[in-house]
Image (cartoon, rainbow, N blue to C red):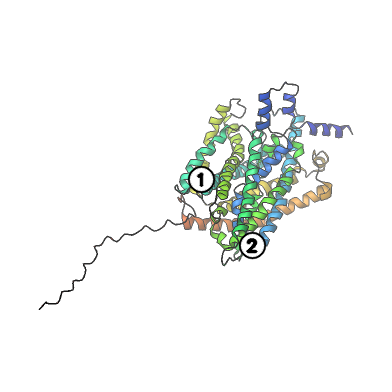
Amino acid sequence: MAASADKVVDTVIVGSYVEMETEGKPKSVKSKLSKFFWDGGSAYDAWFSCASNQVAQVLLTLPYSFSQLGMLSGILFQLFYGLLGSWTAYLISSLYVEYRTRKEREKVDFRNHVIQWFEVLDGLLGKHWRNVGLAFNCTFLLFGSVIQLIACASNIYYINDNLDKRTWTYIFGACCATTVFIPSFHNYRVWSFLGLVMTTYTAWYLTIASFLHGQVEGVKHSGPTKLVLYFTGATNILYTFGGHAVTVEIMHAMWKPQKFKAIYLYATLYVLTLTLPSASAVYWAFGDMLLNHSNAFSLLPKSPFRDMAVILMLIHQFITFGFACTPLYFVWEKAIGMHECKSLCKRAAARLPVVVPIWFLAIIFPFFGPINSTVGSLLVSFTVYIIPALAHIFTYKSAAARENAVERPPRFLGGWIGSYTINVFVVVWVFVVGFGFGGWASITNFVHQIDTFGLFTKCYQCPPPPPPMVFNTTSAPAPIHHPHPHRP
């Protein structure tokens, strides 16, 4: 009984450092305003962060996936991977609380240290798990940041096509580099809220604009037609609901991380109210035309509403770039010994080298849409599905570990047996369908894009320039002279 009480106390104090530090201190108007806009650690902040991070530029590529999958499969895969993603996000949160509780029992102080997923794996399962988790997580977040940068260039082109997409990538790479000044996920409060408002507007713009536009003449909905396209579309949806690679960092920013349990599920349910109507409506209106237009904006007519959606998505992609890149900043800081430095400017300067390879990769592979599926099959499948499920199985494989677990699996899912069964299913399904078939299909499609457009292409999927006007410079033929008849 006493051990159980100790466990409850330990669980309750997880993540309460910020509250202990500020408790009893007088608050000025400036500090209150700063806390309102800048200092977010509540369950609501975590929900906004999860929902805002989950649905970014993929909102614009899901209609493309529907054209590859067909309407029914597109809807079913969204629901299925939404649930699967919510489950593995729960596993990650459970392992984080387990790790942090054990460390705090050992009097470890995390006030100047952000816990990351590879450290959770290290603390619970050892250095080999840490190394694998670190490799997959960093590579995924690196390419996640690359995708946001590619999306910025792809979107702005539909407002201003005076510059090609590669040039826009240079410009937005410099803009996104300013995220080095945002210390941690604790400081994304207002950005997360605004990001979700922006994607909500864009999703409903896509839905309403598609219905108002109506179906194009002779529209066809022939998907699925090829296995390659089918599994490419499926892995893009796998990528869509695999945004919980930053779960640990979001939890660490919370005052009480144990409240995170179902937050990702609630965020996913809201995201589905945006992705299902928008993707279905755009696919209904344009059908197979989407197979050659991976960005939904490219098919909708130019209007002030579309321009507003493009601008809002650009701002949101800047925010999502920060979400994906911030964990990479933390890893780099820890590698060079700058993580506990209290000078924001020094840390910002130390972070800048992280942005350079992201910038470079976005210029090499500007394939907006196909790159999502490739990242989804090769990286997301392991990072946020297979590794968390296996880690949960091995962390609690002994009876003693299950008995002393801080977080027990929900009873309505069958407790430990149900949890083990679901985890095995996740591992097998994602490995075979996501990584196996999805990897084959997405790599085939990706290679096709390289063969078609080439690396470093200046303007991916841009309409061809109009042919130059040809002026006739040859001299006009002399008029035919008709001799006058002889006068008498």
Image quadrant where residue 133 sits:
top right
Q: Residue 70 — which label?
A: 2
Circle 1 packing at 10 Å, graded few (<14), some (14-19), many (20+), is: some
Q: Position of residue 131 (x, y in %)?
A: 63, 41
Residue on which disc 1 sits: 361
At horizontal 68% and vertical 31% (from top left) the residue drawn is 36
Q: Quadrant of the N terminus?
A: top right
Residue 311: x percent and y percent?
56, 44
Q: Residue 306, percent across and down?
A: 56, 50
* Left or right position of 363 against 316: left
Q: Tell me the kind of residue under disc 1.
A: Leu
Q: Which quadrant holds residue 394? A: top right
Mark toward the start of the polypeptide (2 vs 1): 2
**Res 112 seen here:** no
Q: Decide: is 441 above or below 248.
A: below
State the count of labels: 2
**Furthest residue to the bottom?**
488
Q: Residue at x 72, y 24 (%)?
A: 22
Q: Mark 2, residues whose alpha carbon is within 10 Å: few (<14), some, or many (≥20)?
A: many
Mark 2 and mark 1: Cα distance apart in space? 31 Å
| Residue at the extreme front | 488
Task: Establish if 110 lies above or below 488.
Answer: above
Three-letter code for the amino acid on which mark 2 is drawn = Gly
Q: Position of residue 251 (x, y in %)?
A: 70, 37
Q: Nearer the viewer, mark 2 or mark 1?
A: 2
Quarter of the image where one finds residue 250: top right
